Image: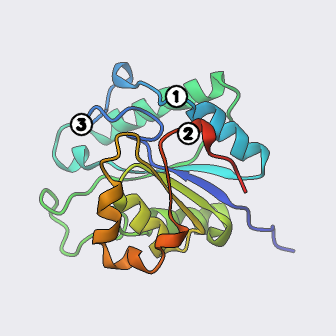
């Protein structure tokens, strides 16, 4: 007997969970986005598994270490716990093509769908019923490439909306992409 797959609430970190101050790697620099805790609790109550998927090129750039990143994630997890949210699995890409010595481009750095697919395989996620909330067009490209049913662009400043139409791979799914500027309004369907 196999366990039924569950939908995920995929969340980018910097820009969706916390304010993106640029290469956030210290707990003191974490400033949570208003509504993010309530958003996660709403989706968990509706049966979604929250999962963080985040590019962390600051590691490849030598700005901070894997350990620094994990320490910040431990801090975020403690804050989640204090708000009644169980531990949230996370996937991260430490690569950047200009700073890595990889022979081939990695498959995990968004806009590649590798982190979402890995989460799907490891956590028994149904991508076809899942949601991805990201603050950049690359998050939306990764979500659509992975087959995520509901890609959502959280674009508080309105800086990313215009870029959606510039990407060939998004034109065919444009009607499926939601654009929001308030996490408090986002509801499970």
Q: Residue at x 41, y 30 (%)?
A: 71
The answer to whether marks 1 and 2 mark residues whose Cβ atoms lie closer than 8 Å is yes
Q: Residue furthest left?
A: 98
Q: Does 108 appear above or below 54?
A: below
Task: Please give the residue where the numbered disc 1 appears in the rendered image.
Answer: 34
Q: Residue at x 64, y 57 (%)?
A: 8
**Earlier sequence position, callout 3 versus callout 2:** 3
Q: How is the image coloured?
A: rainbow
Crowd rating for badge 3 (residues with CA inside 10 Å; few <14, some 14–19, many 20+)? some
Q: Mark 3 or mark 1, which is nearer to you?
A: 1
Position of residue 188 in the picture relative to residue 167 (left or right): right
* 178, 37: nearer the viewer: 178
Task: Please give the residue where the numbered disc 2 appears in the rendered image.
Answer: 183
Label 3: which secondary element: loop
The answer to whether marks 3 and 1 mark residues whose Cβ atoms lie closer than 8 Å is no
Q: Position of residue 140 (x, y in %)?
A: 43, 63
Task: Please give the residue where the numbered disc 3 appears in the rendered image.
Answer: 64
Q: Residue furthest right?
A: 1
Q: Position of residue 70 (x, y in %)?
A: 41, 37
Which of the 4 image quarters holds residue 31? top left
Position of residue 7 in the picture relative to residue 19 (left or right): right
Q: Residue at x 52, y 28 (%)?
A: 34
Label at residue 50: none
Q: Residue at x 78, y 43 (%)?
A: 45
Q: Does 177 appear above or below 24?
A: below
């Amino acid at each position: 007997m196999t366990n039924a797959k569950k939908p995920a609430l995929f969340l980018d970190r910097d820009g969706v969970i916390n304010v993106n101050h640029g290469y956030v790697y210290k707990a003191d620099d974490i400033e949570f986005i208003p509504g993010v805790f309530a958003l996660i609790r709403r989706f968990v109550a509706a049966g979604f598994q929250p999962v963080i998927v985040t590019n962390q090129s600051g590691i490849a750039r030598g700005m901070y270490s894997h350990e620094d990143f994990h320490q910040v994630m431990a801090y975020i997890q403690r804050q989640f716990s204090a708000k009644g949210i169980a531990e949230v699995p996370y996937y991260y890409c430490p690569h950047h093509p200009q700073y890595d010595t990889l022979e081939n481009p990695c498959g995990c750095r968004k806009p590649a769908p590798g982190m979402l697919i890995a989460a799907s395989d490891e956590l028994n996620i149904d991508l076809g019923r899942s949601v991805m909330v990201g603050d950049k067009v690359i998050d939306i490209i990764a979500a659509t490439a992975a087959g995520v049913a509901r890609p959502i662009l959280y674009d508080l400043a309105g800086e990313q909306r215009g870029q959606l139409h510039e990407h060939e791979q998004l034109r065919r799914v444009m009607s499926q992409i939601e654009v929001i500027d308030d996490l408090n309004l986002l509801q499970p369907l």
